[in-house]
Amino acid sequence: MTPQTILFDLDDTLIHCNKYFDAVLDQFADLLGTWFASHKLATETIKQKQLEIDIAGVNLHGFTMDHFPISFVETYRYFSDVLGRSKNAGEEEHLLTLGQSVYQLEVEPYPGMIETLDKLQEEGHLLYLYTGGVVAHQHKKIKSVQLDRYFGDRVFVRQHKTAEALEEIVSSNGFDRSLTWMIGNSMRTDVMPAIKAGINCIHIPAFVEWEYNIIEITEVPRGRFLKLGSLGEVPAAIAESISKQPY
């Protein structure tokens, strides 16, 4: 089997992420619903405004540890202004603390993570991790689930996980594009950048998806493009793809 270069996304590909944000977001919506009870502010209205503000923050600043907590405060300020409710510094501090709490939660691997990485490593493939976020926090998560035994120092962390960022990684490391794969849940930050870079990619939808990650494919893939239902299907899918490819 011809060894492949395989880049894995981290959050919601190898470990759970979105479900923790959704749980904290539920707490936020309940809290604002209570504070604005006299205005009968609907939960869905609160969540849609927070999503709008959060995505705008990510587009502007990238994946930081501030955009989520700040989106809580900015959503609170928006409805306070629109509905004529007085703002309170103590309430804003409480919202920041609530938003930051998501980063303290214990990391949980996706089903099949260890078996998948073991199999690919045994088959001689070279594994890389490519994730978006703050370097120290992402490395903390990597160590907590012992992913360093698979990736070593082959880890790329980018605040802006874009097509340009992936292209820089592929080109600067001299990866053979025909033998390189990007595996992830996000159509926006994993699949489309891989297609633009002309490498192979595998899309595995997250158990709980963030609306930011959902976009339409606007280019024709030059490499192989697979859609799988679970992480555990990856080794067999890559092996089958290799067997059909003339080298």
Image (spheres, helix red, strand yellow):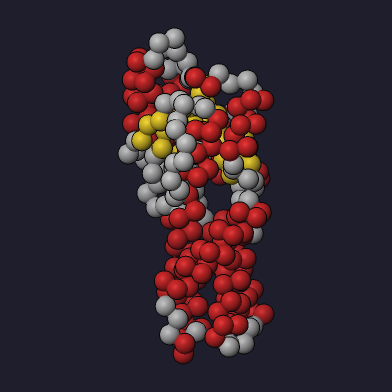
Q: Nearer the viewer, residue 22 or 219?
A: 219
Quadrant of the drawing holding the N terminus: top left
Does residue 66 appear to the left or right of 209 in the view shown?
A: right
Q: Which residue sits at x=43%, y=85%?
A: 40
Q: Which residue sits at x=58%, y=88%?
A: 84
Q: x, y percentage for residue 196?
A: 53, 33
Q: x, y percentage for residue 187?
A: 46, 43
Q: Which residue sits at x=39%, y=15%?
A: 245
Q: Is residue 74 above or below residue 193?
A: below
* Residue 15 seen in this snapshot: no
Q: Is residue 227 above or below residue 74?
A: above
In the rendered image, which quarter is residue 152 located in?
top right
Q: Is residue 239 above or below residue 103?
A: above
Q: x, y percentage for residue 96?
A: 61, 68
* Residue 158 seen in this snapshot: yes
In the rendered image, which quarter is residue 92 located in?
bottom right
Quadrant of the drawing holding the C terminus: top left
Taking the view exactly as shown, the residue that stands out farthest to the top is 247
Q: Which residue sits at x=42%, y=52%?
A: 209
Q: x, y percentage for residue 130?
A: 56, 36
